[in-house]
Amino acid sequence: MYGSASAGEIKKQTLDQDDIDGVTHLYTCPNLQSRIEGTTDEYDFIQDAYDNTASMETMQIQATLFIENLLIDINKSVYLKAGYDCDYLNNILLTTLVGNMTITNGTLTIQSGMLELQ
């Protein structure tokens, strides 16, 4: 990748395969993608993390794409921190949920990070 380009430069606007491979390696986590904060309990889906979170606990969600429907249907208050890196150290990236989020009981509070619903 190039750090700069001259006005009108078009050669540098396309990523080569090694650029794509590098970004994929940096931002694709080899482990599970959500967890309950303060535990080692990790899950593949946001729904699984929610189902296993006790009231007043916090779910941490990695910056990745989730394709699922999320049903908030248990009488409990849960917190969500989205956009984490692979090690759950920084939540400065975007988590995307493609699907529906339905809240029929309880509460879900997004505390930090960015969660995009599509």
Image (cartoon, grey):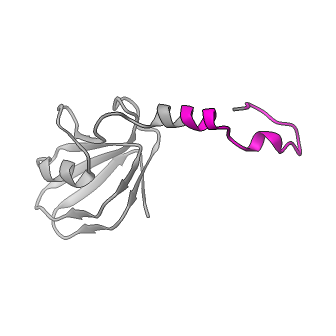
- Please name the residue shown 46% across and 38% down the image: 92
Residue 12 is situated, as x and y percent measured from the top left of the image, at 78, 39
Residue 50 is situated, as x and y percent measured from the top left of the image, at 19, 52
The part of the chain drawn in magenta is 2-22
- Please name the residue shown 40% across and 34% down the image: 85
| For residue 8, above or below residue 74 | above
Work out whether residue 75 or residue 14 is closer to the camera in this orientation and state it: 14
- Residue 72 belongs to the span the image colors magenta: no
| For residue 45, above or below residue 75 | above
Which of the 4 image quadrants contains residue 42?
A: top left
Would residue 71 appear left or right of 63 to someone viewing this image? left
What quarter of the picture does the N terminus occupy?
top right
Would residue 1 appear left or right of 112 to someone viewing this image? right
Work out whether residue 48 or residue 112 is closer to the camera in this orientation and state it: 48
What quarter of the picture does the C terminus occupy?
bottom left
| For residue 101, above or below residue 65 | below
Residue 18 is situated, as x and y percent measured from the top left of the image, at 62, 32
Q: Residue furthest front?
A: 17
Which of the 4 image quadrants contains residue 32?
A: top left
- Please name the residue shown 41% across and 37% down the image: 91
Would residue 111 appear left or right of 28 to someone viewing this image? left
- Please name the residue shown 20% across and 62% down the image: 72
- Residue 20 belongs to the span the image colors magenta: yes
